[in-house]
Image (cartoon, rainbow, N blue to C red):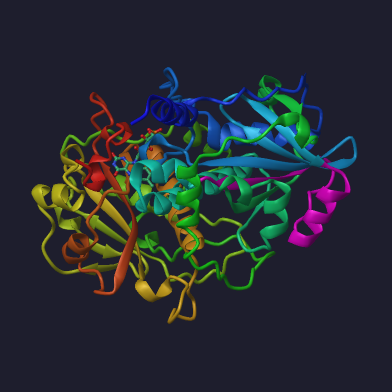
């Protein structure tokens, strides 16, 4: 190859790996909007921080779990600032907000979306998913994890608001396009997930750690980061059906799936207890790294599971195609060990899975095979919106939201009942179908394990290699 040509190719290759100049950062302003202060303090409590005291280096613990500790979502806030509606993008790592737009353009987007900023200093908190962050580790399955993770976060924001005595509401069924344009979401490979309406209330002082930067002049802020890998990943999502049913706003808060555990516990033990205790439960929840295999008390498992019936205010219909099945396999009350359909409370005959079978059904996550109980969340295949779908079908976002929020309730219930818990995305659906006697055409969306925790080792799920998804 002639020398000049080869040095040209080297220059092209070098251009691929070179970095463009850093964008300028507009000066820091204090957070003045009461709605933004409130939203930031709610985000700190409901999603971003944890009081569990495990923060170290870059992997600071959060109030919610996430597959691989990836947290593939971010937030935006709509609030009045000096009487003018404004939209802010939230950078959780830097504790900085960028004002993206203010004035009539925000008011118009809100009108078109059918959402309104609650009066007297309330806010709308938008959760936006960024699927690439999970898909770059987990491939296509990362899209399911993205939705489950966002369900944990959005559900927990509603619980944190309720813990403060606020009756907020979570919306999943609204016109997304106007907001997507306003928040520059689609063009940056983000999807609008949900909107939490946060009524005015007192904010603690956690917002004082935050700054605001003006980004309304896009010329000034420079181009946003983009990679062909993320664009390719984004384009691959075009096939997922968006269809959803009519919203049911204003309905009374309701459980996200039908759960019957009432006959197993005295009333005062069931559920999540007084809402004023929820902030503490949220701040101290953790995922178990391993289970010792010691049996746990069946009553403790039922206490944890009864949290699933906690009502949440959303715009989804009360009736859901989602079912929950509990495999209670190793408790100190062996006569209670069995498979239970939680929709009816019915106990199913049949043998229980061995530890080896649990390991295999959890994709050889051997450290977790000593789980005392397994919760499976599953739907008939036809419940996923698309051609030939059932009447009550919901899209993946809605079904996974129910699963993620239920998962979060189980984490908090387990924390209250002092039982170890971890969500798992690495599971073998056909094998669990057999082990738990699920209907042939049911798909499992999410599984959670409960047991006696052993937190001495490492959490395998946080490693770069996706071991539990067969990556070798
Ligand atoms: C959707 C989802 C899937 C998960 N899958 C697994 C899994 O297969 N194995 C595992 O050990 N942990 C799993 N986890 C737990 C995460 O590893 C854990 O949340 C993360 O490491 C952060 O730790 P923390 O929850 O203690 O803050 C999962 C969590 C979620 C929300």
Residue 270 on image: x %, y %: 42, 51
Q: Quadrant of residue 325?
A: bottom left
Q: Is residue 103 left or right of residue 271?
A: right
Query: Residue 132's spot in the image, x, y percent?
Result: 46, 44
Residue at 37%, 47% in the rendered image? 304
In the displayed structure, 41 sits above or below 375; it is above
| Ligand 1: image quarter | top left
Residue 406, horizontal then vertical, whole percent: 44, 53
**Relative to 243, residue 462 above or below:** above
The quadrant of the picture occupied by the C terminus is top left
Residue furthest out toward the front? 2
Quarter that holds the N terminus: top left
Q: Tell me what residue is drawn at x 20 percent, y 56 percent.
A: 336
Q: Is residue 15 above or below residue 137?
A: above
| Residue 14 left/right relative to 24 | left
Q: Is residue 267 visible?
A: no
Q: Residue 429: name its quadrant.
A: bottom left
Tell me the residue at 56%/55% (across/down): 312
Q: Which residues are magenta?
A: 102-130
């Amino acid at each position: 190859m002639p020398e000049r040509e080869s040095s040209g190719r080297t220059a092209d290759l070098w251009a691929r790996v070179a970095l463009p100049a850093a964008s300028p950062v507009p000066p820091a302003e204090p957070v003045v909007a009461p709605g933004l202060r409130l939203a930031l303090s709610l985000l700190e409590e409901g999603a971003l921080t944890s009081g569990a005291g495990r923060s170290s280096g870059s992997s600071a613990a959060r109030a919610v779990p996430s597959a691989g500790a990836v947290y593939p979502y971010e937030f935006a806030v709509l609030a009045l600032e000096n009487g003018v509606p404004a939209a802010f993008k939230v950078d959780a790592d830097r504790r900085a907000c960028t004002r993206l737009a203010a004035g009539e353009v925000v008011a118009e987007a809100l009108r078109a979306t059918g959402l309104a900023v609650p009066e007297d200093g309330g806010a709308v908190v938008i959760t936006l998913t960024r699927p690439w962050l999970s898909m770059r580790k987990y491939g296509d399955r990362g899209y399911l994890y993205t939705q489950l993770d966002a369900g944990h976060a959005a559900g927990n924001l509603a619980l944190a608001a309720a813990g403060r005595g606020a009756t907020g509401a979570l919306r999943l069924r609204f016109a997304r396009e106007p907001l997507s344009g306003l928040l520059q979401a689609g063009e940056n490979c983000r999807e609008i997930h949900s909107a939490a309406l946060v009524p005015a209330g007192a904010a603690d002082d956690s917002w004082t750690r935050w700054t605001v930067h003006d980004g309304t002049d896009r010329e000034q802020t420079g181009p946003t980061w983009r990679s062909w890998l993320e664009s390719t990943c984004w384009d691959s999502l075009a096939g997922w059906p968006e269809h959803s049913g009519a919203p049911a706003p204003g309905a009374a808060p309701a459980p996200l799936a039908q759960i019957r555990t009432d006959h197993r516990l005295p009333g005062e033990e069931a559920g999540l207890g007084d809402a004023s205790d929820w902030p503490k439960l949220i701040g101290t929840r953790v995922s178990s790294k391993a289970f010792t295999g010691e049996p746990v008390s069946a009553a403790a498992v039922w206490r944890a599971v009864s949290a699933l019936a906690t009502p949440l205010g959303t715009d989804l219909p009360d009736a859901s195609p989602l079912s929950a099945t509990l495999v209670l396999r190793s408790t100190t009350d062996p006569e209670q060990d069995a498979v239970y359909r939680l929709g009816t409370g019915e106990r199913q005959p049949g043998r229980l899975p061995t530890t080896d079978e649990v390991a295999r059904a959890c994709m050889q996550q051997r450290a977790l095979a000593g789980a005392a109980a397994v919760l499976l969340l599953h739907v008939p295949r036809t419940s996923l919106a698309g051609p030939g779908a059932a009447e009550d079908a919901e899209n993946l976002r809605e079904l996974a939201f129910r699963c993620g929020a239920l998962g979060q309730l189980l984490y908090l219930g387990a924390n209250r009942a002092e039982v170890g818990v971890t969500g798992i995305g690495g599971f073998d659906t056909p094998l669990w179908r057999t082990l738990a006697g699920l209907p042939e055409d049911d798909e499992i969306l999410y599984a959670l394990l409960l047991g006696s925790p052993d937190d001495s080792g490492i959490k395998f799920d946080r490693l770069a290699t996706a071991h539990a998804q067969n990556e070798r």
